[in-house]
Image (cartoon, grey):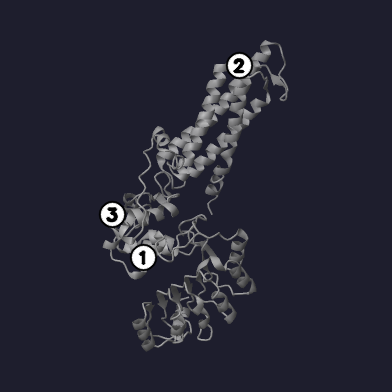
Amino acid sequence: MDLFQFVARFHVLVLHLPIGILMLAALLETHMVFGKSKRPYLLNVIWFWGAISATGACVLGWMLSQADGYAADAIFIHRSFGISVAVIGFVCWWLFKRAYAEDDVTQGQSRPHASQPQKNAKPKLLVSVLSGAQLFFLFATGHYGANMTHGETYLVEHAPNLVRAVAGFPPHKAARPPITSLDDVVVYDDLIAPMLEQRCASCHNDSKQKGKLNLANMEAIVKGGTSSNTLVIGDADASELYKRITLNPSHKEFMPAEGKPPLSDDQVAIIKWWINAGAPVNERLPSVAMEKSDKVFAMNVLGLSPEAFPAIPAITLEQANALENAGFVVKQIDRTNGYLDLDLSISRRPITAETRAALSAVSQNIAYVNLSYATLSAQDMALLSTFTGLKRLRLEHASVDANTVFELSTLENLRYLNVFGSSVDDSIFDVVSNMPALEQLYLTGTNVTEDNVNAFKTASQVNIYYVAYTSADAKSSAHGTE
């Protein structure tokens, strides 16, 4: 636990106080001096507490800047403007208070009560300059602070080119032609960069670099961050970029962190392929070696395959909570649709009536589900058969056998089935022969026979992953590694 950083993170809460208070003070001050209204003494109090809150935000901001992750020049600019806000706040409080006090003495009046108005006697120029300066520095501080957290282009990301030009930004990049085939794909620009932009850029950009890592362009990725092996070209398993996105989501080093949406299984698989393939940049996809499964992953990411998901309504917060309470890790496959990736293998909670109810309520949204190590009844298998959109099913070491697996034969959209270490036998081939979309089948550690595996390989287009040893051997191996 880092108490210093715990306190520092209240900066994002406190900073809103001076924005509201000092903006109100500056606008009221200007209104009073140019209008006919008399100035209330309470404005002195507003200026004072606005300046105090700005000082508090500055202190907390300085504390927050001691953590890694922000560019030094960005911190300097934001800090300078922030300090200016606090200083101008105190200057306005002191000068305006003094000006009115002197004016009251000149007229032989005693100091008014806070609720009583004061005579409008300040020079309009003084009010205009100081109030205008306060508003300018407030906006500038907020703008550069937002740049640090959202990136320098956040404000003008969707602005017309004329506005971008006035703000000193280049015009929008010409839209890349729509991808209609894998033959059109430039590996980095079309496949890798959009994923990093979508999932990673908010914390690893030109202005904000957690772990001193910038993922905004290929040059920065190769340079890496605090870790010298961010990208080990040709070896995904040795690359921190790949390691961090494949950790358990509860791990403190899992990325993306802080509740941000994780990469989908397809995206993770493509990152692994890309690194192992030598991290190609300008090459077109057909020129880079790919397994059939990698092509499927790429097509899914690009929305080209039959597994590309049409838009459907997302589940409700109550439905998501019910799934999480049942022990599932719940991921939305892509924010453009409402399909889900559910994982029960981490919690290994037993499947109960409440679990079935939570699943039934979102059955049309379930595309991927991991029930490895689960004890599955015939009722549970029958429920799985109703998931008409199910495309991936993982049942490693689950209690699936010849008596229950037949329920899966209705899954016409299933493309990936893993029953590693289960008790299924050769009857599985009768089941999967009714699955027209099936592409990958994992049978190692089951009770199937090698002859039937080879026969099915010959008769179908399904990629079968099989090593000849029994489910008992698989379970023994699993217990030895847990």
Which amino acid type corresponds to the residue marked 3 in the rendered image?
Answer: Asn
Is 354 placed above or below 253 here? below
Which amino acid type corresponds to the residue marked 2 in the rendered image?
Answer: Lys
| Residue 353 is at least partly visible in this image | yes
Q: Position of residue 482 (x, y in %)?
A: 48, 75
Is 245 placed above or below 481 here? above
Q: How many marks?
A: 3
Q: Secondary structure at mark 3?
A: loop
Rendering quarter of residue 326: bottom right
Q: Which mark is residue 133?
A: none
Residue bearing mark 2: 122
Residue bearing mark 1: 237
Q: In the drawing, does residue 118 fall left or right of residue 228?
A: right
The residue lying at 52 percent from left, 56 percent from top is 259
Label 2 and label 3: CA atoms lie apart by 65 Å
- Contact (CB < 8 A) between labels 2 and 3? no
- Contact (CB < 8 A) between labels 3 and 1? no
Rendering quarter of residue 362: bottom right
Q: Position of residue 114 (x, y in %)?
A: 71, 25
Label 1 and label 2: CA atoms lie apart by 69 Å
Q: Mark 2, mark 3: which one is toward the viewer?
A: 3
Residue bearing mark 3: 282
Around disc 1, counting alpha carbons within 10 Å, would you say few (fewer than 14), some (14 to 19), or many (20 or more)? Answer: some
The residue lying at 53 percent from left, 25 percent from top is 132
Is 277 placed above or below 135 here? below
Rendering quarter of residue 15: top right
Which amino acid type corresponds to the residue marked 1 in the rendered image?
Answer: Asp
Q: Quadrant of the N terminus?
A: bottom right
